[in-house]
Image (cartoon, helix red, strand yellow):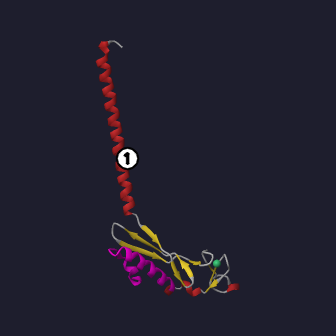
Amino acid sequence: MSPAALPWALAGLAVVTAGAFAWAHARARRRVAELEAELAAVKAADRSNEYRVDRFDLFWYPSVIYREAEKLLVRASPGVPFCRACVKALASQASQASQGAGWKCPGCGALSPESIADTAATDSIMREAVRFFLARRPEYRVAPELERLK
Ligand SMILES: [Zn+2]
């Protein structure tokens, strides 16, 4: 390279470098916008917590669904009962006439009465989950349909 060409080479390098910076900057801004959108979606999404409740000689894993942005508990679910010995989900025997109605453990075969999953029973499980939730997050409101569980 002749000494006369050096300034042109430097000028060309500066243009290329400036272009690379502009491209990298635009890419970083796009990525920031993507991450901000992801964060907003995560904050707006319903979240859930699961608890373990020991009731009727069984384990239950009730869950609650809540909205952080609104500080609102929107749903509660009792989950299915689990055998305490095997920690396996019990299967409803309601449709099997040979064994009568009830809940059966697929592990040890223990039978639980059908009444463990009636409304009063499942409400008591959900009430426990709501109580656990509100104990740690007293600033939350509950949806009208969950008022009975407070
Ligand atoms: Zn069992």
- Residue at 30% from the left image edge and 27% from the top image edge: 14
Lateral position of residue 108 relative to residue 63, left or right: right
**Residue type highlighted by circle 1:** Arg
The magenta-colored residue range is: 121-150
Lateral position of residue 113 relative to residue 148, left or right: right
Return the residue nearer the eye: 145 or 1.
1
Which residue does the numbered mark 1 point to in the structure image? 31
- Residue at 29% from the left image edge and 23% from the top image edge: 11
Residue 13 percent location from the top left of the image: 33, 25
Lateral position of residue 88 relative to residue 98, left or right: left
Mark 1 surroundings within 10 Å by alpha-carbon count, few (fewer than 14), some (14 through 19), many (20 or more): few
Quadrant placement of the N terminus: top left
- Compared with 93, 64 (above or below) is above
Quadrant placement of the C terminus: bottom left
Q: Main secondary structure of the magenta part?
A: helix
- Residue at 33% from the left image edge and 12% from the top image edge: 2
Magenta stretch contains residue 131: yes
